[in-house]
Amino acid sequence: MTDHEIKINFKEYNSLTELNQTDQALCHEAVKAMAGSHSPYSKFRVGAALRLQSGKIIYGSNQENVAYPSGLCAERVALFNWGANHSDDPIEAMAVTASTDEFELLQPVTSCGSCLQVLAEYEKKQNKPVEIILFCNNGPVWVMNGVESFLPFLFFENRLNVEAK
Ligand code: THU
């Protein structure tokens, strides 16, 4: 038996003002994206903004449905928009934020496993990691470089290949 340990690396900033101007601007776009949230059931608004290599910003917000599983997270709304309409313009960074009137959010929201799996697919497709910036109104900012920081044992399509042992 061998014991293994995996370390993940991420940066924590006390506030958005510590980020560079480009990332700060992207975070402000994520805040704007929350305006499109359709969240009558959870009352939890999530906004995501993707900055593409060309400088273009694309948006997503959580879209809920009375048939609950039909809804979709903000990250996947933005990422599938990228996949469908902008995939020739690589994603440099994704900023995600959330807010609710029900309580104060003191820590950033971290993306769910399904959103991370979708992000992983597109990192693979564009052959480049995406900088992930997670923040909330009055809490710290967490910055990760690429989805593998979250999912070191991620399922990649090369596992479908008989040569990948
Ligand atoms: N949600 C997101 O949009 N992104 C996340 O990272 C976590 C959760 C949404 C799904 C649902 O509309 C609401 O937040 C509460 O779970």
Image: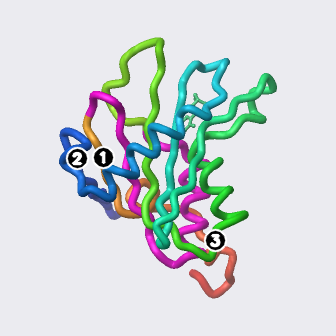
Q: Is residue 40 left or right of residue 165?
A: right
Quadrant containing the C terminus in the rendered view: bottom right
Farthest residue toward the top? 102
Q: Quadrant of residue 117?
A: bottom right
Residue reaching furthest to the right: 67
Counting from the top left corner in percent of width and height, residue 72 is at 68, 39
Query: Residue at left 50%, top 50%?
Result: 49
Disc with the residue nearer the chain's start (2 vs 1) = 2
Q: Which residue is mark 2?
A: 12
Residues marked 2 and 1 touching at CB (< 8 Å): yes
* Rendered residue at 25%/37% (across/down): 140
* Crowdedness near tag 1: few (<14), some (14–19) or many (≥20) residues, C-alpha within 10 Å: many
Image spot of residue 11 (x, y percent): 24, 53
Indicate the secondary structure of the residue bearing disc 1.
Answer: strand
Reply yes or no: does residue 126 show up in magenta. yes
The picture places residue 114, in percent across and down from the top left corner, at: 61, 48
Return the residue nearer the eye: 162 or 3.
162
Element type at marker 2? strand
Which mark's residue is nearer the viewer, 1 or 3? 3
Mark 1, ligand 1, within 8 Å: the answer is no
Q: Is residue 93 above or below residue 106?
A: below
Which residues are the magenta region?
110-139
Q: Residue at x 62, y 76 (%)?
A: 88
Ligand 1 image position (quadrant): top right
Lower position in the chain sequence, tag 2 or tag 3: 2
Disc 2 + disc 3, Cβ < 8 Å: no
> Where is residue 112 shown, x and y percent of the image?
54, 42
Q: Which residue is mark 3?
A: 87
Looking at marks 1 and 3 on the same chain, the residue that comes earlier in the sequence is marked by: 3
Q: Quadrant of the N terminus?
A: bottom left
- Type of amino acid under label 1: Trp
